[in-house]
């Protein structure tokens, strides 16, 4: 299991996008649990980003919900942003 740190910007985005939406909240926490156990689980579609977001990674939560994160250490990640494709890229 990896250690997950929530960036302040991620906390704000979570409150705005997920906290008051029951569908998003349920799916986020389900996928978060999978992510904490295995970040590269195929259900999450985890992949590297390129361009201006080079060095960051993303996993899909819902069809139009992405979570951007960065590996701080091999077993530690920093969650950076959450939102739709257009919001986070």
Image (cartoon, rainbow, N blue to C red):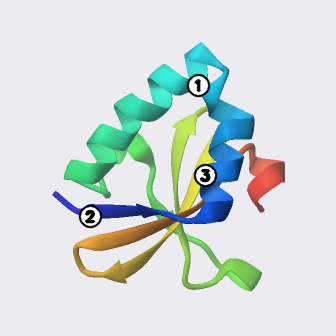
Res. 78 image quadrant? bottom left
Q: Please tell me which of labels 2 and 1 falls first in the chain.
A: 2
Q: In which quarter of the image is the C terminus?
A: bottom right
Q: Sequence order check: which comes first, mark 3 or mark 2?
A: 2
- Mark 1 → mark 3, Cα distance in angstroms: 15 Å
Q: Residues within 10 Å of mark 2 (few under 14, many from 20)?
A: few
Q: Name the residue under label 2.
A: 3
Badge 3: how crowded within 10 Å, few (<14), some, or many (20+)? some
Residue sitting farthest toward the left: 1
The residue that label 1 is drawn on is 24
Work out whether residue 5 can be spotted: yes
Q: Residue 11: which disc? A: 3
Q: Which of marks 2 and 1 is in front?
A: 2
Which residue: 62% across, 63% down?
A: 8
Image quarter for residue 14?
Answer: top right
> How far is the residue under mark 2 from the one under mark 1?
22 Å
Cα distance in 3D space between marks 3 and 2: 16 Å
Q: Residue at x 36, y 29 (%)?
A: 30
């Amino acid at each position: 299991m990896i250690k997950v740190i929530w960036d302040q910007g991620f906390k704000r985005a979570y409150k705005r996008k997920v906290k008051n939406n029951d569908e998003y909240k349920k799916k986020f926490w389900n996928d978060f649990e999978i992510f904490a156990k295995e970040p590269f689980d195929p259900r999450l579609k985890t992949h590297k980003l390129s361009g201006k977001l080079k060095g960051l990674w993303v996993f899909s939560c819902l069809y139009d919900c992405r979570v951007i994160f960065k590996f701080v250490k091999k077993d530690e990640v920093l969650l950076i942003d959450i939102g739709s494709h257009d919001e986070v890229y």
